[in-house]
Image: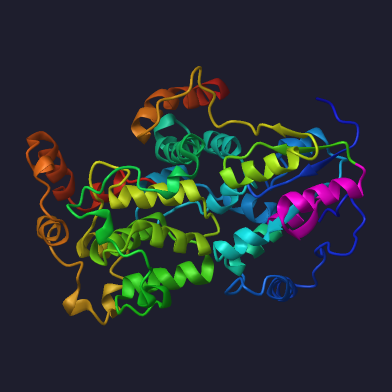
Amino acid sequence: MTFQRPILWIHEEALGANNPALQAWPEAPAVFVFDTCWIQDARISRKRLGFLYENALDLPLTLRKGDVAAEVLAFARRHQADGVVSSSAVDPRLEQIGEAIDAELPLELLDPEPFVELPRPPRLGRFSRYWREAEAVVWEGYSAAR
Amino acid sequence: MPSAASPPINGDLPRQFASRDALNTLLAQEFPEAEGELSPIRGGREAAENKLRRIDARSYAKSRNHLNGAVTGLSPYIRHGVLSLPEVRDAVFARIRNRDEGGKLINELGWRDFWQRMWLDLGDGIHHDQEPFKTGHDAGAYSRELPADVRAGTTGLACMDGFRDQLVSTGWLHNHARMWMAAWLVHWRRVHWKAGADWFLEHLLDGDPASNHLSWQWVASTFSHKPYFFNRGNLERYSDGHFCDSCPSANSCPLEGSYDQLENRLFAPMPAIRETGNNRNQQRQRRSSGGASAALARPKR
């Protein structure tokens, strides 16, 4: 899927310059939205909001607050965007927000660089099982750099 | 500092602040329900890079279980993607002379990756007991509310009140302090792990639901084979006696005792577990072999 005029939705799992959406579309208007429902429901303290805010200020973002999907879609209309680009998220809350955006305007998700790429999904359940499969692959990067 | 690519309109939050106090004031206006003040720990790439430069993988491996050990403090930046896990991994690789030097720290990055994979796998399931408690107590025996004295930091235990104060004022706690506090709250105060885990997320700058909730479950035994607990000797050793010296409860400390004594006091008999001799012996060996091993194999939060 290729957009002509996308906007970027930057969320709280990827507030860094290595965000794949920012890297793919460095000139596109980008927005971060403070999720007021989450802040209220989870009693998020000001410390955490300030930390998110200071991270966001390092990036070329417009900052908003409110209902995240609604704000992202309004930001898209403001820029006559034909789509939204973001980074794939782990948090189901962010995934649901993405689905709500996608119901109105196409959303493309880009994957951040993985910590370790395994030939097949590792066995989870306990850390030791995962690490038995992942550790050697992680360290291949070290040997390669020697 | 970059500016937004988009000209501001009504309802955009400001990007320019004369000082950190001005940001604090803005947050108080815009988010009046969010309690407390800013953390002394700053967000942003520069703060993250300062911490990244100070990584010392060798010292980390030796001293990480001590409250004043050479831990990295990178978790808030990793959690929010300011630093990526591959970036931190490569920074560790660049600083070590051989694999042994970086083993422990790379292992901890592995924990972060593991928790994220678990979250993808379990979704909102992380909010529920993954397995039954192995404490001999039913899930219903644990209070669903965080006790008021814990929230206020007035329990009379210098260590726990101290951890609470650090959590609330800075939004960061050493992993060992998180584990002690979780174990004390769940096993001594008989509070359900979810009440404590949610409270931590109100405050932790690295507040990652997967790392946090599953680690609380690990302590509680709903995501492990047995409950994690500790004793006063362990806490005293890794906190350099800092809390006990000034603790009003020093002479009536509920954490005092051998691991066997505490196990008998805290947990009800679990016949199914006690009959499996091998497990039982392993458990004893690990717990009785001193303070170090009680913490070394524990997950990082």
Residue at x 12%, y 45% (from the top left corner): B284
* Left or right of B29, for residue A142: left
Coloration of the structure image: rainbow
Q: Quadrant of the C terminus of chain A?
A: top right
Seen from the viewer's position, the closer of residues B10 and B256 is B10
Name the quadrant containing residue A128.
top left
Residue B197, by quadrant, is: bottom left
Q: Is residue A57 magenta?
A: yes
Up/down of B169 relative to B202, above or below: below
Residue B41 visible in the shown view: no
For the residue pair B137 and B101, the one nearer the viewer reads as B137
Q: Is residue A18 left or right of residue B225?
A: right
> Does residue B13 appear in this view?
yes
Please state the horizontal and vertical placement of residue B64, each as a whole percent of the image: 38, 51
Which region is colored magenta? A55-80
Quadrant holding the N terminus of chain A: top right
